[in-house]
Image (cartoon, rainbow, N blue to C red):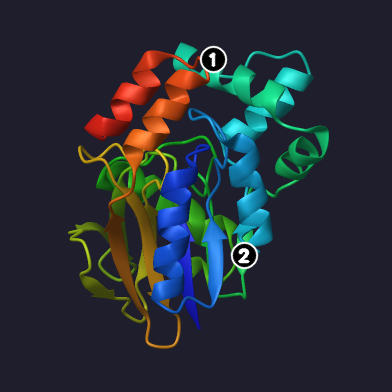
Amino acid sequence: MRYAIFSDIHSNLEGLEAVLKEAERCGADRLLCCGDIIGYNANPVECTELVREKGVRCIRGNHERGLVDLEAGNFPNMNPLAMAALHFTAEALPEEHRRWLVSLPDVLRVNDCFYLFHGSPSDPDEYIFDPFEAGYAFKSLLSDYPPPANLLCFIGHTHVCAAYSFDPERRKVRELGIRPGNRESLLPGSHYILNVGSCGQYRGGIPVATMALMDLDEMWVEFRFLEYDYRSTQKKVLAAGLPVPLAVRLGMGQ
């Protein structure tokens, strides 16, 4: 069984289409998304429709939960750029689309083999930027979620690809090097937290859409960094009247 896992689409139709095309080319049997289908960019309706059409299994991210906060009259914990995009998204989405987005789970266990989280196993809004933070996340993964699925999880939220392993015998967390196309073997007995980055607003310094490909039979994972037509996405952001920095950052990989 081969899975294509991606995250943080953020209403970027061009980035999403690039990832779906690559997943098909690689023979992925299942498609998974770690949340934040919406936000920041100009195609929330089209992206929502496309993930549903393709049968992508999704969880909620903080931007989907932001829709819940808005409806309840609460102020989401977001910066001004994210808030501007969230208000745009709330106005653009038909009610049926909104209901589907907010109904998504915050956690997904896939075939008793691994988990999907948006941020961290301990908190869906928590960022994991380094091995120190990953250490606390591993503690939650091992204590709060039952085996065997707690050997492995995929996350997003930071918009940057990363991979961490935990050796329970040595009690040591290690950050694994991420190189496009490199195949990382998943070793028996080790635990892994794999951040698939973002296919809609990558923040690793290059204008790409990212995803991970995992083969569950052979137990390996590869990260893919895909070129896409980000300039078209930028034009849509500006035409929609969204804040200019949201368009600029796409070209800078920020």
Q: Residue at x 44, y 79 (%)?
A: 27
Q: From the viewer's perspective, tell me whether residue 132 is left or right of residue 58.
A: left
Q: Nearer the viewer, residue 104 or 23?
A: 23
Q: Residue at x 29, y 36 (%)?
A: 203
> Where residue 29 sits in the image (x, y, percent)?
53, 78
* Quarter of the figure that contains the C terminus: top left
The answer, for residue 107, to whether it is visible in the render is no
Q: Nearer the viewer, mark 2 or mark 1?
A: 1
- Label of residue 84 in the image: 1
- Amino acid at pointer 1: Ala
Q: Nearer the viewer, residue 125 or 222?
A: 222
> Where residue 167 sits in the image (x, y, percent)?
30, 68
Image quarter of residue 26: bottom left
CA gap between label 2 and label 1 equals: 33 Å
- Amino acid at pointer 2: Arg
Q: From the viewer's perspective, tell me whether residue 220 is left or right of residue 92.
A: left
Nearer-N-terminus badge (2/1): 1
Q: Residue at x 24, y 74 (%)?
A: 183
Relative to 162, say whether 115 is above or below.
below
Relative to 52, say whether 169 is above or below.
below
Q: Residue at x 44, y 14 (%)?
A: 243
Q: Nearer the viewer, residue 92 or 202?
A: 92
**Could you say whether the residue bearing mark 1 is in a helix, strand or loop?**
helix
- Identify the residue position indicated by label 2 in the image: 109
**Could you say whether the residue bearing mark 2 is in a helix, strand or loop?**
strand
Image quarter of residue 25: bottom left
Relative to 181, say whether 140 is above or below.
above
